[in-house]
Image (cartoon, rainbow, N blue to C red):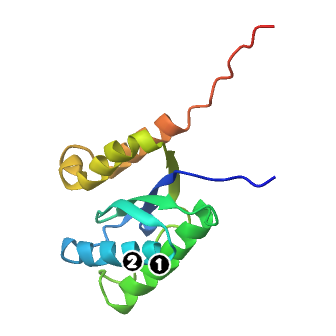
Amino acid sequence: MKIEYHNLYTHFIFITLNRLPLIPEKNRQRIEKHITGVVNHLNCKVYAIYANPEHVHCLVLRIPDMDEEQLSGIIETSSSQFINENRLSLGRFQWQDTCTAFSVSKRDVKKVSEYILGQREHHLTQRFAEEYEEFLKFYQHPIQPRKIRV
């Protein structure tokens, strides 16, 4: 059976190797533009992106033919190569072996976009390690099955 997909929004978090602050502020926008261009070239759309020194948040609308693992792999490979070739990092740049992906409902796109674009202010009051733990706790809660009356 053919399935039609709509509204495949994913919030990705890419983390630098060992959470080192490898992305200098002076190169942040250039890296964001590169990642946005890569995503757009794949017929997907970036709704919001922010490159912090040790992690990048990116909200993407995916096409049905592109799953999270494929998309994140392409972003990881191309951005690492771009950053290293252009010497946009202090030393050799590398992402962790995994990234995190959270599904986002269409009604939450604006809220998540605002959160991502507010990263500079957000991290004045909360460290990334604390933020990441909160994400994992929030999104990893198991879904409780509803009791069905018979």
SS label for mark 1: helix
The image shows residue 27, relative to residue 107, as above or below, that is: below
Q: In the rendered view, does 63 fall on the left or right side of 18?
A: right
Identified at 38% across, 92% down, the residue is 85
Q: Based on the displayed image, in which of its 4 quarters is residue 141 positioned?
A: top right
Type of amino acid at the residue the image marks with label 2: Gly
Which mark, residue 41?
1
CA neighbours of label 2 inside 10 A, class few (<14), some (14 to 19), many (20+): some
Tell me if I can see residue 16 in this picture.
yes
Identified at 33% across, 46% down, the residue is 110
Q: How many marks?
A: 2
**Mark 1–mark 2 CB contact (< 8 Å):** yes
The image shows residue 132, relative to residue 66, as above or below, that is: above
SS label for mark 2: helix
Q: Based on the displayed image, in which of its 4 quarters is residue 37 positioned?
A: bottom left
Question: Where does residue 108 sit, x and y in percent of width and height?
Answer: 40, 41
CA neighbours of label 1 inside 10 A, class few (<14), some (14 to 19), many (20+): few
Along the line of sight, which residue is nearer the eye, 124 or 111?
A: 111
Residue that numbered label 2 is attached to: 37
